Amino acid sequence: MVGEERFKLIAEVHLVLFRAGKTLLLRRFRTGWQDGNYSVVAGHLEAGETARAGMAREAWEEAGLRLAPAALRLVHVCHRRSDSERMSLFFTADAWQGEPVNREPHRCDDLAWFAVGALPPNMVPYVRQALAHIRAGNPYSEAGWED
């Protein structure tokens, strides 16, 4: 309709890395959202940035990992609702440069590899759900629409 503001969706990128049966997780700290819970390296896309470029940027900013955007593969999409509607894109890569290091200690108080079959109980719910879908080979899920 004329005069109505167009719907806006927030795009986020998430990095799911696997090594020797483990996945890389970080614990949120002093962010004001889901603090104390584990998630994956993630962030919002910036204007004019492709999803893979944004994922590579976030991997460097948060964990000191160098990833070639072309090496990132989309493995899952979660359309979710929280304070707003969001499209969460989950990427993985088979190779990267560097070892994970916590480059944002003011927002993360643990960065470690966890056995895929023994994830910590305190995880961001939609991230736990997405990891289960990824392991099952499901490319799409929804979260936060139960209301």
Image (cartoon, rainbow, N blue to C red):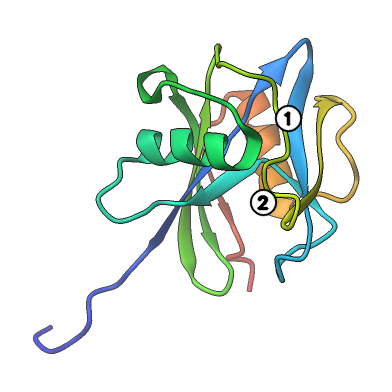
Q: Position of residue 97 (x, y in %)?
A: 56, 16
**As shown in the figure, which amino acid type bears the numbered disc 1?**
Leu
- Seen in the picture, residue 141 relative to 18 is either above or below; the reply is below
Q: Position of residue 71 (x, y in %)?
A: 42, 17
Instruction: Judge the density around disc 2: few (<14), some (14-19), many (≥20) Cα neighbours within 10 Å.
Output: some
In what quadrant of the picture does the C terminus appear? bottom right
SS state under label 2: helix
Q: Residue at x 44, y 23 (%)?
A: 72
- Seen in the picture, residue 88 relative to 67 is either above or below; the reply is below
Query: Which of 52 and 144 lies nearest the eye of the viewer?
Result: 52
Which residue is tagged 2? Answer: 126
Query: Which of 78 and 100 lies nearest the eye of the viewer?
Result: 100
User: Would you say 129 lies left or right of 48 here?
Assistant: right
Q: Residue at x 64, y 67 (%)?
A: 146
Which residue is tagged 1? Answer: 24
Q: Residue at x 87, y 51 (%)?
A: 122
Q: Position of residue 32 (x, y in %)?
A: 72, 71
Q: Residue at x 73, y 30 (%)?
A: 24
Upstream in sequence: badge 1 or badge 2: 1
Q: Nearer the viewer, mark 1 or mark 2?
A: 1
Furthest-left residue in this view: 2
**As shown in the figure, which amino acid type bears the numbered disc 2?**
Tyr
In what quadrant of the picture does the N terminus appear? bottom left
Query: Which of 31 and 14 lies nearest the eye of the viewer?
Result: 31
- Seen in the picture, residue 11 relative to 72 is either above or below; the reply is below
Residue 145 occupies quadrant? bottom right
